[in-house]
Image (spheres, rainbow, N blue to C red):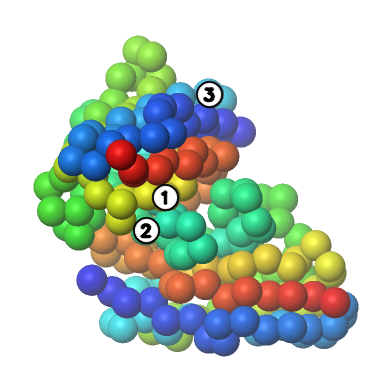
Amino acid sequence: DIQMTQSPSSLSASIGDRVTITCRASQSVSVHLSWYQQTTGKPPKLLIYGTSSLQSGVPSRFSGSGSGTDFTLTISSPEPEDSATYYCQQSYSTPYTFGQGTKVEIK
Amino acid sequence: QVRLQESGPGLVKPSETLSLTCTVSGAAINSYFWSWMRQPPGKGLEWLGYIYYSGSTNYNPSLKSRVTISIDTSERQFSLNLNSVTAADTAVYYCASLGMTGIMRAFDSWGPGTMVTVSS
């Protein structure tokens, strides 16, 4: 199985600060890396697929980059509603696997 | 816009079979792969498997053949069966659409989730 490791596990940032979350795969996943946002009691919501493609309806302050084993989710100017847990997920090979999550608090 | 809704018992006894159904609306059943995930309380996400409208399946080996996913295209539903459950199977179970066209290989729509507790 491909192991996905996110860092940090949690972070706190101020409104307007740039937020960066990293995700490392235990082997190459090519560009098949997605990012999801989950708020309490809700299902995950797809933000980014194919490493850097923005899902329809997702604000442009979210962006993704990387390739191979190292990936980044950036929130350029976060707003309070971006407080959530973020997960990366690889779809390069089954079993599909998720990172452990990064809890983000925007104050 | 794909809409998904899980249904099934919220309480299952140990050693019995967990059975859930996901009803699809807003999209053709042959447009996606259809998947199940779960999330134990306070923990991360685990992919359980997927099914295509043709009936082709792919399962997470971690479940050791306890899992079966089936599809009823006429009812626009797909189902999850997980047998020999234990307390470790207590989780919120989600169904989701898995887009698999071009660069898109992601779970793009999710049901609201249903909590299943394994307890006697």
Mark in front: 1 vs 3: 1
Q: Which numbered tag is attached to residue B46?
A: 2
Pointer 1 and pointer 2: residues touching (CB < 8 Å)?
yes
On whether disc 1 and disc 2 are found on a single subunit, the reply is yes
* Above or below, B111 relative to B44: above
Residue B44 % position (x, y)? 45, 64
Q: Is residue B22 above or below residue B89?
A: above
Give the spatial CA distance, label 2 vs label 3: 24 Å
- Is A88 on the left-hand or right-hand side of B20? right
Q: Label 1 vs label 2: CA separation? A: 10 Å
Measured in 3D between alpha carbons, the distance from the residue under mark 1 to the one under mark 3, in whole angstroms, is 24 Å
Q: Residue at x 31, y 83 (%)?
A: A26
User: In the image, what residue occupies the spot 62% across and 49% down?
Assistant: A42
Other residues around mark 1 within 10 Å, as few (<14) / some (14–19) / many (≥20): many
The residue under label 3 is B25
Q: Are marks 2 and 3 in contact (CB under 8 Å)?
A: no
User: Looking at the image, is mark 1 or mark 2 earlier in the sequence?
Assistant: 2
Residue behind mark 1: B91
